[in-house]
Image (cartoon, rainbow, N blue to C red):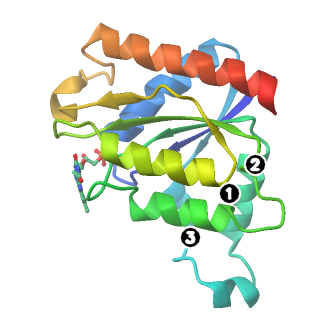
Amino acid sequence: MIRIAAIAGSYRTGSYNRTLLAIGVAAAERLGAEVDLIDLRSLGLPVYDGDLEADPGPPAGAVELKRRLGAAQGILIASPEYNGSIPGGLKNAIDWASRPPDVPFGGAVAAIMGASPGGLGSVRGLAHLRQCLTAMDTWVIPSQVTIPAAHKAFAADGSLVDSRAHAQVVALVERLVDAAGRLR
Ligand SMILES: Cc1cc2nc3c(=O)[nH]c(=O)nc-3n(C[C@H](O)[C@H](O)[C@H](O)COP(=O)(O)O)c2cc1C
């Protein structure tokens, strides 16, 4: 069975990106994938610090994150952009998980999405996230989903108001699950 690790780049309760991720998760499950929803806040990661890493060693949350990412063939991320880039919490989690041994990113496949109340829907942040994942030898699906005006994009039940946007999420997840089955 294909296993997908799903991560929201926002810690916030009521996050648009958590809502967007949930749509992707449901689509993956409908395709028969097993989804591991990783809540970054619950990992309690400190800011990456090479001294901490050396002694007493990587924090339990970093070890857990690596284990869970390593068990997945595909990674689905929905993230806002903060100041035109990757939110610090998400970047910090990636930095911890990128440390050897057993780096979980090489040969993995990822799909990225973003929602923001602004007009760009996190497109600048996704460009940096794509660059970061690619630097770690992760295959990032060329297409992506951006949801601008996120404050108006979701219905009360968490669905996307625009059926075309919903179809884009489903199509992206289909590509992710398909590629994950073939790449790792
Ligand atoms: C520190 C910070 C920086 C932000 N920078 C941007 C930005 O560059 N572009 C943008 O569209 N929105 C930006 N925002 C607004 C976020 O897109 C907005 O808070 C969004 O709701 C966050 O996603 P979430 O709903 O998943 O938590 C920023 C928000 C914060 C807290």
- Report if the CB atoms under discs 2 and 3 are less than 8 Å apart: no
Residue 36 position in % (x across, y down): 66, 38
The kind of residue tagged 1 is: Leu
Q: Look at label 3 and name its amino acid.
A: Leu
The residues tagged by marks 2 and 1 sit, at their Cα atoms, a distance apart of: 15 Å
Question: Looking at the figure, which quarter contains the N terminus?
Answer: top right
Could you tell me residue 16's position as x and y percent? 31, 38
Say if 30 sits above or below 153 in the image: above
**Residue at numbered disc 1:** 65
- Mark 2 or mark 3: which is in front? 2
Estimate the x, y position of residue 57 in percent, counting from the top left. 75, 82
Q: Residue at x 54, y 27 (%)?
A: 25
Label pair 3/1, CB-CB below 8 angstroms: yes
Q: Is mark 3 within 8 Å of ligand 1?
A: no
Q: SS for tag 3?
A: loop
Q: CA distance from mark 3 to mark 1?
A: 10 Å
Q: Name the residue carrying label 2.
A: 106
At label 2, the amino acid type is: Gly
Where disc 2 sits, the SS reads: loop
Task: Give the distance between the C-alpha atoms of the residues marked 2 and 3, in whole angstroms.
Answer: 22 Å
Q: Which residue is mark 3?
A: 45
The answer to which image quadrant residue 64 occupies is bottom right
Q: Is 48 on the left-hand or right-hand side of 162?
A: right
Q: Residue at x 29, y 29 (%)?
A: 147
Q: Residues within 10 Å of mark 2 (few under 14, many from 20)?
A: some
Callout 1 secondary element:
helix
Q: Residues within 10 Å of mark 1 (few under 14, many from 20)?
A: many
Image vertical order of residue 25 relative to residue 13, above or below: above
Residue drawn 17% across the image and 32% down it: 149
